């Protein structure tokens, strides 16, 4: 059965063009946009100043909500992890994190992931499909609706595109999502409050540099040399470090914006002083526009070959980078008591479903 498209997937211009093509007035787009993102209604019937014919046309063509809450887990630190079911039955994860600067939501862009990082729970299940831009926007809206239901007038203020999947492997839908959430008459989440993370698709980093949006970029590096990076991230075979760094140089030259390098610390694998020195050397000519985010590893049951680095190893790595002139910090953990690693909740739920099916068969 063909599902209706999520109206959240349309930019305001796309919505305007669709309305005009269907015999409606241009000003309706602003009204509908206001109902969706300011008043945050969940049905077209609630759009009281939109005429009945237009509401019926919208209802016959689009859906508003295409995600269903399957599981909601709340951490002691206020982090909330959502497991959403899509209209085709697939499951995705979204996380709300609380910081001193506001509320940040980590969104998913694909059902599963083909990048195959050996330490990551997201890649345990291969990519089933890309999410539509409407399904990505829908994650922000479901989280905002959850906050609205609590009556505290809290608002999502930041977005990180770092959930399940590789955003640049779903480039067009990711870009459309960014245009929708950044729209000043909608959710109005500032471009500098949004960060997109990539595992290093060099050609898409160059394309992203040419986009007329000042969205932040983070690159999952995790190793300072090809041998080690290929061992833990198979994407490095297609985009080795020299090719990746050429793309990053283009990005920095084109945008003059700082880039963040994500570096997950794995005990005895990539967390030695030697690797820290190699990393500093690799980033030396980019240090004025670089920041290294050191991430303590969250153990994943299925990847038991890896362990979290010791506090001393993390400290030594951090201090070595600083001494070499590299700006860096250690990520503060969020939600460590609720399946913290990305993809863990989804993986656990699917495993549980499969066990139930096997018992019933």
Image: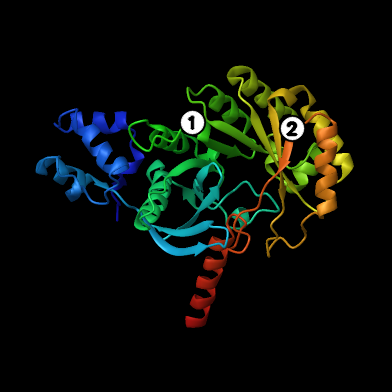
* Residue matched to label 2: 327
Q: Residue furthest top?
A: 253
Label 2, label 1: how many angstroms apart (C-alpha)? 22 Å
Q: Position of residue 175 (x, y in %)?
A: 46, 33
Look at the numbered discs 2 and 1 and tell me whether their residues touch, using CB distance below 8 Å.
no
Whether residue 310 sits left or right of residue 346 in the image: it is right
Task: Judge whether residue 268 can be spotted in this image.
Answer: no
> Looking at the image, which residue is at 78% across and 52% down?
266
> Looking at the image, which residue is at 51% across and 35% down?
193
Residue 57 or 102: which is nearer the viewer?
A: 102
Q: Position of residue 271 (x, y in %)?
A: 82, 47
Name the image colouring.
Answer: rainbow
Quadrant housing residue 31: top left
Of the residues under marks 2 and 1, which one precedes in the sequence?
A: 1
* Residue matched to label 1: 191
Q: Residue furthest right?
A: 274
Task: Judge whether residue 152 can be spotted in this image.
Answer: yes
Whether residue 292 sits left or right of residue 96 in the image: it is right
Quadrant housing residue 221: top right
> Looking at the image, which residue is at 85% across and 38% down?
320
Q: Position of residue 255 (x, y in %)?
A: 58, 20
């Amino acid at each position: 059965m063909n599902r209706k498209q999520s109206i959240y997937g349309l930019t305001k211009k796309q919505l305007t063009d669709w309305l005009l093509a269907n015999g409606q007035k241009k000003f309706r787009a602003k009204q509908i946009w206001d109902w969706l993102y300011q008043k945050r209604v969940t049905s077209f019937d609630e759009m009281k100043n939109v005429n009945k014919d237009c509401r019926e046309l919208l209802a016959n063509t689009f859906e508003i909500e295409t995600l269903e809450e399957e599981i909601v887990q709340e951490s002691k630190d206020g982090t909330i992890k959502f497991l959403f079911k899509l209209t085709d039955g697939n499951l995705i994860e979204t996380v709300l994190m609380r910081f001193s600067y506001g509320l940040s939501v980590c969104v998913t862009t694909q059902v599963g992931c083909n990048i195959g990082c050996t330490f990551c729970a997201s890649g345990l299940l291969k990519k089933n499909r890309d999410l539509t831009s409407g399904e990505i926007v829908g994650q922000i809206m479901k989280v905002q609706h959850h906050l609205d239901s609590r009556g505290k007038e809290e608002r999502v203020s930041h977005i990180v595109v770092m959930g399940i999947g590789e955003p640049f492997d779903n480039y067009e839908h990711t870009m459309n999502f960014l245009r929708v959430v950044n729209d000043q008459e909608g959710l109005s989440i500032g471009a500098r409050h949004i960060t997109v993370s990539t595992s290093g698709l060099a050609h898409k980093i160059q394309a992203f540099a040419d986009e007329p949006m000042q969205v932040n970029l983070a690159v999952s590096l995790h190793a300072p040399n090809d041998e080690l990076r290929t061992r833990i991230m198979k994407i490095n075979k297609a985009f080795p470090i020299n090719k990746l760094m050429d793309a990053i140089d283009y990005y920095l030259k084109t945008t003059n914006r700082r880039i963040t390098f994500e570096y997950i610390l794995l005990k005895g694998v990539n967390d030695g002083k030697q690797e820290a020195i190699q990393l500093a050397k690799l980033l030396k000519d980019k240090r004025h526009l670089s920041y290294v985010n050191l991430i303590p590893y969250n153990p994943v049951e299925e990847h038991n070959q890896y362990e979290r680095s010791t506090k001393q190893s993390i400290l030594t790595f951090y201090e070595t980078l600083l001494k070499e002139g590299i700006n860096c910090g250690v990520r503060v953990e969020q939600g460590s008591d609720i399946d913290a690693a990305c993809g863990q909740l989804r993986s656990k739920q699917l495993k549980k479903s499969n066990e139930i099916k096997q018992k019933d068969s």
